[in-house]
Amino acid sequence: MKNHIFTLLLIWIFSAGCYKDKGNYEYTTLPEVIVTGLKEGQKFTAYVGEPFRIPVTVEVKNGDLADFSYEWKIEKEVVSTKKDLDIMVNKSARYAQLDVIHNNTGVRHVTFFEITVSSPFQYGWMILSDLGDKSQLCFLREDNVFVENAYHLQNNEYLGAGAYALCEHFLPWSSEIGQVFIACQQGPGYSVEIDGNTLQKMVYTNQEFVDGVPADFLPQSMNCVMNWDYLINNGKLYTREQPNGVDALYQEGSFLNFPVAGDYELLPWTMMGNLVFNSDVLAFDKKTCSYVLLRNGEMKTFDTSRDETKAFNPSNMGKMLLGGGVCSSASNRDDFVTFLKDMNTGKIYVQKFFFSGWNNRSFYTESEVEFPESDLIDEDTKFAVCTGRNYAYFTNGKVLYVYNYAENIVEPLRTDFPTVIREIAISRANPERLAIAFENAEDASKSDFMVLDVSVVGKGKVIEGTEVKGKCGRVVDIIYKIGDQWSI
């Protein structure tokens, strides 16, 4: 009986409590916010000194848009309270967000995104052209903004005539933006080195020699590594020591105005593997048909003492180098693919080799195979080798070919170009992007330029927004400017 009374008492107390609270809480359905034009985690590039805009559309379900306000934040700092972002970014940033705020409740709908702040010229395609009496540098940015006559725009002067080559170089182990060497072979200024952020001239190359410029000054290429800078001028090697190593500055010291001794003639072509963990530069001597290694300020033939495969002899080959590049790069190993022509038979060969180790890397051969379509290679053929993919691209007249060097197979990629292809280049930042320049159909002194998607599914399709017609002169070189050596 007592248990029954106790149970009834508990039921009454519980019921009374529920009844007392009934109706005390008022439930409200919050408006649903829908933002379009900005995705969660989306990545943007903002350029220093230029407007940065993100227009968005905001819709509200079960509510009134007038009851909402906005906060755009960069690194937690509110930079705008307008619906659309429209600001100037002048400092480094990464994390950003848009808060759409319900004013009555303070509830926020947050969309996080990322911003990379870059100089206008930090990343993108550099295009060097010959205009006859002068040279031209154009630039296609990552956002597909094309800057015609970029060097003249930034320096209020034209490059010297005789446009020849481009080479981006860096301070050892530094995360600073690199510089670019522009080889021009006619005076008065000849070649220049320019700042990688602004494209402003740092120095004329003919001012970088001890006791004056060499008499036969025809600059062709430059590479800068730990402790040494190498300049190929008219087939000869000139050196500049940088004894301060990782503490060296750009243009520190001067080049000797006499070349490294020896009976040789270097091709303008050079190759480098990993830009940070490697201090070797590969070159080729035309006189002996031999690879040479630029190491510690000296020029020497490849040391084959550790090469067990011996797929080929890198010296006195009787084959002339036509082109090639690094196909795989790591901190302690660099792999290369090269194309060579047998001087007696005319046949084309493909060589694969690598350098491995941490200090004074050792040379190893992998293979030498006969190229399956030697007739497609002529004196005007251009080559571009992918890093991290088993593909190289080459040209023959109006046709762009793809070569799978792992399977030794050649296939045409694009046969519909209207005129002769002048230059091609692979992006080291994205090996599925290939830049191409071909003769303008209406004016042979000019070139058209575009970037192709050379991924397996892209099949050479033009990347939207990258096609530029007739604004470049006769293109002689293209590189993708990576900006920071640590970025690849």
Image (cartoon, rainbow, N blue to C red):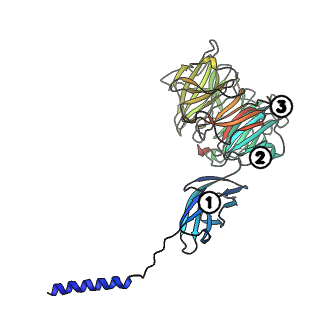
Residue 200's disc number: 2
User: Can you say which quadrant of the picture contains the C terminus?
Assistant: top right
**Cα gap from disc 2 to disc 3, whole angstroms:** 22 Å
Which residue is label 3 attached to? 132
Foreground: 86 or 56? 56
Q: Quadrant of residue 354?
A: top right
Which residue is label 1 attached to? 57
Q: Nearer the viewer, mark 2 or mark 1?
A: 1
Q: Mark 2–mark 1 contact, CB under 8 Å? A: no
Helix, strand or loop at label 1? It is strand
Amino acid at the residue labelled 1: Thr
**Cα gap from disc 2 to disc 1, whole angstroms:** 40 Å
Q: Position of residue 433 (x, y in %)?
A: 61, 37
Q: Quadrant of residue 391?
A: top right
Q: Earlier in the sequence, mark 2 or mark 1?
A: 1
Q: Position of residue 48 (x, y in %)?
A: 70, 55
Foreground: 303 or 119? 119
User: Can you say which quadrant of the picture contains the N terminus?
Assistant: bottom left
Q: Earlier in the sequence, mark 3 or mark 1?
A: 1
Foreground: 86 or 96? 86
Is 250 rendered above or below residue 105? above
Instruction: Identify which residue is drawn at 43% across, 79% down.
Output: 25
Instruction: Identify which residue is drawn at 58% across, 60% down.
Output: 35
Q: Is residue 478 left or right of residue 302?
A: right
Q: Position of residue 56 (x, y in %)?
A: 63, 59
Helix, strand or loop at label 3? It is loop
Instruction: Identify which residue is drawn at 70% across, 47% down.
Output: 249
Q: Earlier in the sequence, mark 2 or mark 3?
A: 3
